[in-house]
Image: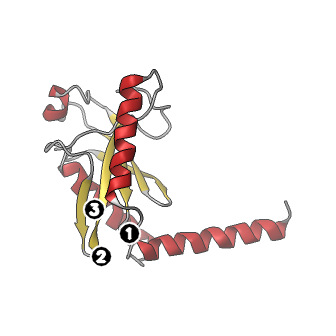
Amino acid sequence: MGEEDLTTIHIAQNVNHALMRRVAGAMVRPVSRLHHLRTLAERVLARYDLHGASLTLVSETANAVFHVTVPSGRPQRLVETGMTRDGAAYALRLRPPGWHRTQPMAEELQWLLALRRDTDLVVPEPVPACDGTLIQDISAPDTSEPWQGVLFTGSPGNGGRRA
């Protein structure tokens, strides 16, 4: 691959990222964007009673994905359901508004749950929030449509090991 090909790929990637930010309704500076995504992620985690969890942005392409680490001794509700342990790690996926509809996302989560339940495949498991829902709609000042968040057991890069 020549230098010209690499330049074309780099330009295409930059245009793609700019378009995704426009779709998400948030044409903001990168530092402000990271703060915006962290704020949305914290709102999702509040639905799981995971206040004070550590958030690290892993990826921002079609979705923003965070590595979430739960401090020791937290959270009681998820401990009772068997969904966590001290120092547990999760992956949090934030989907921007207008990217996909809720129904295909819900079907994807049900498919993951069925794979986990009915096979020996190691796949991430969606974690229900305190109210039992898997998909969290989060309002944001940048758009009239909600962002959507889903918490998964395991974290990016751990091979999908079961929690």
The dot on residue 75 is none
The quarter of the image holding the N terminus is: bottom right
Whichever of callouts 3 and 2 sits on the residue coming sooner in the sequence is 3
Which residue lies at the image location 46% right of the left edge and 27% below the top edge?
Answer: 122
Disc 1 on helix, strand or loop?
loop
The quarter of the image holding the C terminus is: top left
- Check if mark 1's residue and mark 2's residue have beta carbons within 8 Å: yes
Name the kind of residue labelled 2 in the image: Thr
Distance between the alpha carbons at the discs numbered 3 and 1: 19 Å
List x then y, in percent, for residue 156: 46, 41
Residue holding disc 1 = 98
Q: Nearer the viewer, residue 147 or 102?
A: 102
Residue holding disc 3 = 39
Whichever of callouts 3 and 1 sits on the residue coming sooner in the sequence is 3
Of badges 3 and 1, the one in the foreground is: 1
The dot on residue 143 is 2
- Check if mark 3's residue and mark 1's residue have beta carbons within 8 Å: no
Which residue lies at the image location 39% right of the left edge and 69% below the top edge?
Answer: 33
Of badges 1 and 2, the one in the foreground is: 1
Name the kind of residue labelled 1 in the image: Gly
Looking at the rendering, which quadrant does residue 25 occupy? bottom left
**Crowding near the residue tagged with mark 3, few <14, some 14–19, many ≥20 C-alpha atoms within 10 Å:** few
Whichever of callouts 1 and 2 sits on the residue coming sooner in the sequence is 1
Q: Extreme right residue here? A: 2
Distance between the alpha carbons at the discs numbered 1 and 2: 10 Å
Whether residue 126 is visible to the viewer of this picture, yes or no, is yes
List x then y, in percent, for residue 101: 36, 61
Disc 3 on helix, strand or loop?
helix
Name the kind of residue labelled 3 in the image: Thr
